[in-house]
Amino acid sequence: MKTQPVLICFGLLGILLFSHTGHADEFYKELNLIGGYSNTRDWVGTNGKGQKNSVGFEYFKIFSDEYGDTLKLNLQLRFAYDSLADSDDAFGIEVHNAWLEYKLGLGRAIRFGHFDTAFGLEPVLDTHSSLLQTLAFDNIGFKKDWGVGYRTYWGDFDIEMAAQFGSGMGIRYKDHNYLLSTRISSKTESGTEYGISFLHGQTLQSRQSWTIPVADLVSDKSIQRNRMGVDMQRPLGPFRLLSEFAIGDDEGTTVGGGMAQLEYDLPEQENTTLKFQTLAWYDEWNNSDTLKLTLSPVLEHRLSSTWTFRAGYFHDLYHPDDNEQAFLIQLYYFGK
């Protein structure tokens, strides 16, 4: 059965869920309601990059002994509905985080399971609930993957490496797929963080983002990807700037793009943040017909410690298929 590896992972995580040896044990409930109107797809319930109407949870636990913390567990799961899919394929289970991390020493740890690929801004940003996403979907095709990761440091530099399946949401092995990634970063006293990333592998592309049921593959052939990327986070006057750029090749075809995002907290409305993102990606670097360029202003208002309201406008200035304009609203709950 294709789902057997996933069910085995659930079984192992389930054993740990009912263990009582840790000193930190947190369970959070999640509700994600999203909807809006698109000039090309009429009424929609997704932002097209992972956000769907869903209900889920996150479980986090730290295990310790007399010497301190030794093991961390994180399980983040959603039961989701895809409004753009056929009715028979519209419901599924998304496993987002599903990892165990063992502490090897000061600043060093090894991680097993489903977690962020070590490339770009995605490993250091929490985009799980955000309408705005990083380059990950255009660049790799997914944000998280199954495998093993290692974190350490060298002087002022943090180093994160991962060896993963290259299959995204589900555990799949076909046509020798794999994914290797590394991100090296450094943070300055001013709060500016720089990162440089490298990626190589053979990845699979799925038509759906489900873990269960197993998603259909776009092709039985894996895609060879090579990437180099740089990213930066820094304060910029009253703003916060997030940016990243990646370039490389898919099966010998040069691809690349960039993302820049400005964030501004309203001075007299500390719970309200204005965000503006521009994202560009070329599926063929020298072919303007493959350019995808999107401008996205978003308003985010924290109604309480558990509820957040977001509203955004997404305008595809250039796109190989269509130039979509969409307005989306989101109501998001995350709490105990």
Image (cartoon, rainbow, N blue to C red):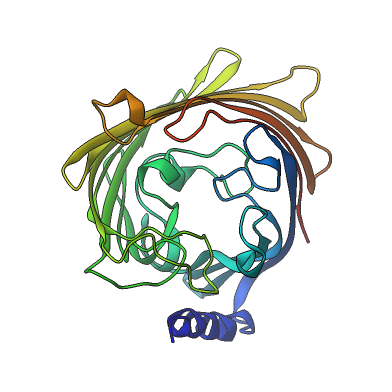
Give the answer, above or below, for where 294 lies relative to 172: above
For the question of whether residue 16 can be seen, the reply is yes
User: In the rendered image, which quarter contains the N terminus?
Assistant: bottom left
Q: Nearer the viewer, residue 195 or 256?
A: 256
x%, y% of residue 150?
Answer: 32, 60
Instruction: Describe residue 273's horizontal placement relative to residue 247 as left or right.
Output: right
Instruction: Describe residue 47's horizontal placement relative to residue 231 as left or right.
Output: right
Give the answer, above or below, for where 151 lies relative to 49: below
Instruction: Describe residue 177's horizontal placement relative to residue 111 as left or right.
Output: left
User: In the rendered image, which quarter contains the C terminus?
Assistant: bottom right
Figure label count: 0
Q: Quick one: which residue is furthest to the right in this view?
A: 303
- Residue shown at the point (26%, 65%) measured from the top left: 177
x%, y% of residue 331?
Answer: 78, 45
For the question of whether residue 60 can be seen, the reply is no
Q: Nearer the viewer, residue 168 or 287?
A: 287
- Residue shown at the point (35%, 50%) measured from the top left: 118
* Quadrant position of residue 22: bottom right
* Quadrant position of residue 78: bottom right
- Residue shown at the point (63%, 71%) measured from the top left: 23
Q: Quick one: which residue is furthest to the left in this view?
A: 252
x%, y% of residue 169?
Answer: 47, 64
- Residue shown at the point (57%, 65%) measured from the top left: 94
Give the answer, above or below, for where 129 lies relative to 9: above
Q: Quick one: which residue is furthest to the top in this view?
A: 237
x%, y% of residue 70?
Answer: 46, 71
